Image: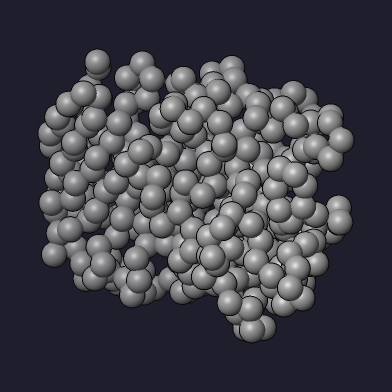
Amino acid sequence: MKTKYFARAMTRALWVGGIAAVTLGTAHGAARGATLHGIATAGGDSINAAGADATGAADFAEARTLVAGIPRDTVYGRSGKLRVRFVSARRGTFAIPILTRLFGDSAVHNPGVYSLPDSAADQPISFVTLLPFETKVKGTVGSYRIGYWPEERGRLRNDAYENPDGFVVVTPENQDLQVSEHFKLRDFLTHDQQNVWPKYMVLEDALVDKLELVIQDLQAHGIAVEHMTVMSGFRTPQYNAQGVGRKGGRAKDSRHQFGDAADVFVDNNRDGRMDDLNHDRRVDSRDARVIVAAVERVERAYPELAGGGGIYRATRAHGPFAHIDARGWRARWSRS
């Protein structure tokens, strides 16, 4: 297996059974004592960081100053509940100066999870650097089957359907990363290829922020939400295509493929089905309407999060649920 080095930042790397333990040095702004754990993609041709922590005491004050200079909702979202922000080299964000100062220039290009020390911010925040979209060869990344986006097939409807910037690399080690107060990375994974690791996912901050705002709104209207289940989050195009064309099936250009859509239901008792949200002693599509009513209120308050709201009735395969997305324009539908 070929070992690659993180430019300027890595002082040593140890490979054990395909797992890399990397110690970052202080040169060129990398934080003292920071550690990085990663794995190699199929073929061992790149390193995907599964976790990184800036732990150098001398860097705490600098990190806090950097974060303090940025509006709180820029860091933690409109909800204030985000715990992860996604970063790509082609998309300029507030995170890039923080990443380069604390973890070195390579952090913007090396896929991984880069966590700020607890004392650097008033609540946990990590930055996840994406694996570039161009890493996909034909319909796969490594041994993970993904398929093709509409733009790759010459079906670009508008800018909202452009190819994703890149992929979140999900490993057994980082799948439980808290992306917000109520959600983890694994909540949004495609439901296939269970034994294939690493997995690759598209996930937008705006979706997670919107879901947290919907939860806040429901709670403000007297509806307890201890747990919201993501029944379907990101779908790879090849997985999405399996349901296209059948009655009640998936849309060919489903927003789930772009990481800004989720099918959800409130399930506080963890029985795998929607709770009775409207207290009529029944669980049906009217409970999904309660969730979409919250979506309406959230979008009125935050029009930049406009998107889809769909109501779905129960079938033999699943209970009722609501579709929520952040596509950029309002869309509503009901299958109830």
Q: Nearer the viewer, residue 235 or 12?
A: 235
Residue 73 in percent (x, y) is at: 51, 72
Count of numbered circles on the image: 0
- On-image quarter of the N terminus: top left
Looking at the image, which residue is at 58% across and 63% down?
267
Tell me if residue 123 can be seen: yes
Residue 146 position (above or below residue 222): above
* Position of residue 212 in the picture relative to residue 46 (left or right): right
The answer to which of 178 and 191 lies nearer the viewer is 191
Q: Is residue 110 visible?
A: no
Query: Which quarter of the picture shows residue 106?
Result: top left
Which is nearer the eye, 224 or 48? 224
In this view, 153 is above or below 282: above
Q: Position of residue 38 (x, y in %)?
A: 28, 36
In which image quadrant can residue 44 be found?
top left
Q: Could you say where residue 231 lies in the image, as x and y percent from the top left? A: 62, 49
Is residue 182 found left or right of 37 in the rendered image? right
Q: Quadrant of the C terminus?
A: bottom right
Q: Residue at x 41, y 57 (%)?
A: 178
The coloring applied to the image is one colour
Question: Would you say 6 lies left or right of 77 here?
Answer: left
Image spot of residue 92 (x, y percent):
50, 51
Q: Residue at x 25, y 24 (%)?
A: 18
Farthest residue in the front direction? 281
For residue 265, what is the image quadrant?
Answer: bottom right
